Image: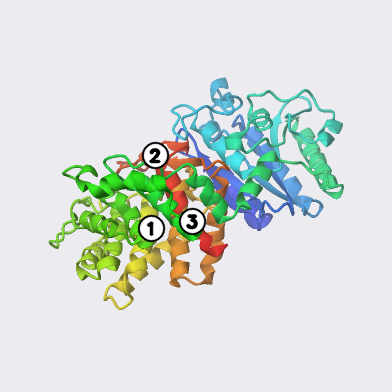
């Protein structure tokens, strides 16, 4: 953040906006985080307050940034008038232009049009900011977005979704369709629906005056039960109000129907989720699941060939579920056959786990070794698992995990694997085991570190420690599952319920009514730089990995309904 703007924002929050939080809504092409001042109720979808987002600095000029800072000061001076509003601010949308003092027309106008952006989430080589901004605003889903800009005379241009009372302000024609404000008024982002918006252009005095006038009109509209109505907010409210079973059924209509060879946890977790859902709802396991898995169970050699990776071995987590439900010994034997393919000689990490001690293997081993011990009571499985976990060597003093010993970055799903693996381990590890206390301490320390980085939306970021990176669904669901399982086991106390509820609400907002998912990081190995993690593609719609892990989380949350 530019020192001048950083100082101004911190002064405003500490002096006048104590109930607000400083956050970030994206990362620029040049790697800067785009700051946001979030109102106290920015993610309150109860309808008890009207949520406003005011955006400045679309062109990135000093004058426009100073304009919104003046607006913030003035609005704060009238805060008693606006107690029924929760107002958030993006002081400078075009942050690269501002911080680089770029005066070229191309630099200043690159974020004025081109909405909604088409693809390249969130790695576009030229304008990644538009992807971040579009998704962040869409899922923050304010009741009204106000964009401010400087001009020679006053001009108020609403979008197609704006409330009628804006037309009383001598409005101009509708704002252009491909501007941010225009696109919010017409585009359905992942079936969310439109968001009211208006652009106010004029001299500093005119913009400040008209912004105050508009905010007063919003307050007056609340008194007549006709405040701005955001279809996007309504959609998120409905999604958040769904029960865990409803979300699980939506996800189970999409995921858990594939098990390609070589088998892999990516699809195997989805099959497991469908079995667990049937079990929770006292239904029979669907016949198609047996048709899907039995060819592998009857002939394990077809599962993955001669050299299975740990991700393939963990692709059989569903075998334990089927044995529990059906008591069919072939499912137990299949699971043990795969678990026995991990090296039991005492070598660490046990092949085929990655020799660099990647966090993925905390889940792969935690899920397979724990289940195998529960089925057999044979200590060798716990020895392999616990010796691996206590020798990981990648947990930092913050509690967070590096991706592996050679990759010192706090990847979101990497830490999700750590939480998931530890929760799976503690599900099966007896409390009398000599390493139980050490492993629980690792789990508790990780959760403590993660809670410090939870976004106010409830979600976690692609890079845990970088709040400008995108809000990533798989890590959110994995961390949520790990907390929910800890509460279920009695390992975590009631203080974890509020962050778990926020996680659940954040995840539900990004799971559509049809079971599609939004922003799950694509397959990712160990990468060379933090930037490489930042630009990993975010998948939306159908994605086996994200959908399967979301299904595990939603079924786990059924215990709380």
CA gap, disc 3 and disc 1: 26 Å
State the residue lying farthest toward the top: 105
| Residue ID for mark 1 | 420
Circle 1 — which element? helix
Let me know if residue 360 appears in the view. Answer: no
Q: Nearer the viewer, residue 122 or 150?
A: 122
| Residue ID for mark 2 | 522
- The mark found on residue 327 in the picture is none
- For discs 2 and 3, the disc positioned in front in the rendered view: 3
Residue 524 locus on image (x, y percent)? 34, 41
Q: Nearer the viewer, residue 554 or 144?
A: 554
In the drawing, does residue 324 fall left or right of residue 304?
right
| Residue ID for mark 3 | 283
Dot 2 or dot 3: first in sequence order is: 3
Let me know if residue 110 appears in the view. Answer: yes
In the drawing, does residue 274 fall left or right of residue 146?
left
Circle 3 — which element? loop
Task: Write down the quadrant of residue 435 in the picture.
Answer: bottom left
CA gap, disc 1 and disc 2: 18 Å
Image quadrant occupied by the C terminus? bottom right
Dot 1 or dot 2: first in sequence order is: 1
């Amino acid at each position: 953040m530019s020192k001048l703007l950083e100082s101004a924002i911190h002064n405003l929050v500490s002096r006048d906006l104590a109930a607000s939080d400083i956050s970030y809504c994206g990362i620029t092409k040049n790697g800067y985080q785009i700051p946001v001042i979030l109102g106290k109720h920015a993610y309150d979808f109860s309808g008890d307050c009207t949520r406003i987002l005011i955006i400045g600095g679309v062109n990135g000029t000093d004058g426009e940034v100073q304009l919104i800072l003046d607006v913030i000061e003035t609005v704060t001076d009238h805060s008693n008038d606006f107690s029924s509003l929760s107002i958030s601010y993006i002081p400078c949308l075009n942050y690269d232009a501002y911080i680089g003092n770029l005066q070229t027309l191309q630099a200043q106008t690159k974020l004025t049009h081109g909405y909604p952006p088409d693809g390249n989430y969130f790695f576009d080589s030229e304008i990644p900011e538009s992807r971040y901004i579009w998704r962040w605003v869409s899922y923050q889903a304010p009741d009204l977005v106000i964009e401010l800009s400087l001009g020679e005379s006053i001009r108020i241009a609403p979008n197609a979704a704006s409330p009628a009372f804006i037309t009383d302000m001598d409005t101009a024609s509708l704002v252009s369709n491909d501007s941010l404000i225009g696109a919010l008024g017409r585009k359905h982002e992942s079936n969310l629906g439109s968001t009211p918006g208006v652009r106010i252009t004029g001299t500093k005095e005119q913009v400040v005056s008209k912004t105050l006038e508009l905010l007063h009109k919003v307050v007056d509209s609340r008194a007549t039960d006709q405040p701005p109505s955001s279809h996007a907010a309504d959609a998120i409210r409905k999604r958040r109000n769904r029960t865990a079973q409803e979300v699980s059924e939506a996800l189970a209509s999409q995921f858990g129907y594939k098990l390609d060879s070589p088998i892999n946890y990516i699809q195997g977790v989805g099959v497991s989720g469908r079995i667990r859902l049937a079990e929770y709802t006292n239904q029979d396991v669907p016949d198609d699941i047996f048709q899907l898995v039995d060819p592998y169970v009857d002939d394990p050699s077809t599962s993955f060939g001669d050299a299975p990776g740990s991700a393939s071995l963990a692709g059989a987590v569903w075998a334990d579920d089927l044995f529990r439900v059906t008591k069919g010994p072939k499912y137990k034997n299949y699971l043990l056959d795969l678990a026995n393919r991990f090296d039991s000689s005492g070598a660490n990490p046990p092949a085929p786990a990655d020799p660099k001690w990647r966090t993925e293997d905390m889940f792969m081993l935690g899920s397979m070794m724990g289940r195998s011990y529960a089925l057999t009571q044979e200590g060798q499985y716990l020895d392999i698992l616990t010796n691996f976990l206590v020798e990981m060597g990648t947990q930092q003093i913050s509690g967070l995990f590096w991706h592996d010993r050679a990759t010192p970055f706090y990847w979101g799903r990497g830490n999700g694997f750590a939480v998931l693996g530890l929760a799976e381990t503690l599900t099966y590890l007896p409390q009398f085991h000599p390493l139980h206390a050490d492993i629980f301490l690792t789990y508790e320390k990780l959760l403590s570190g993660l809670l410090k980085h939870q976004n106010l939306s409830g979600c976690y970021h692609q890079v845990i420690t970088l709040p400008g990176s995108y809000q990533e669904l798989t890590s959110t669901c994995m961390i949520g599952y790990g907390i929910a399982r800890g509460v279920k086991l009695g390992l975590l106390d009631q203080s974890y319920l509020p962050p778990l509820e926020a996680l659940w609400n954040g995840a539900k907002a990004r799971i559509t009514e049809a079971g599609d998912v939004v922003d799950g990081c694509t397959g990712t190995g160990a990468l060379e730089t933090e930037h490489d993690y930042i630009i990993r593609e975010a998948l939306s719609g159908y994605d086996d990995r994200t959908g399967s892990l979301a299904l595990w989380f939603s079924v786990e949350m059924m215990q709380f309904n």
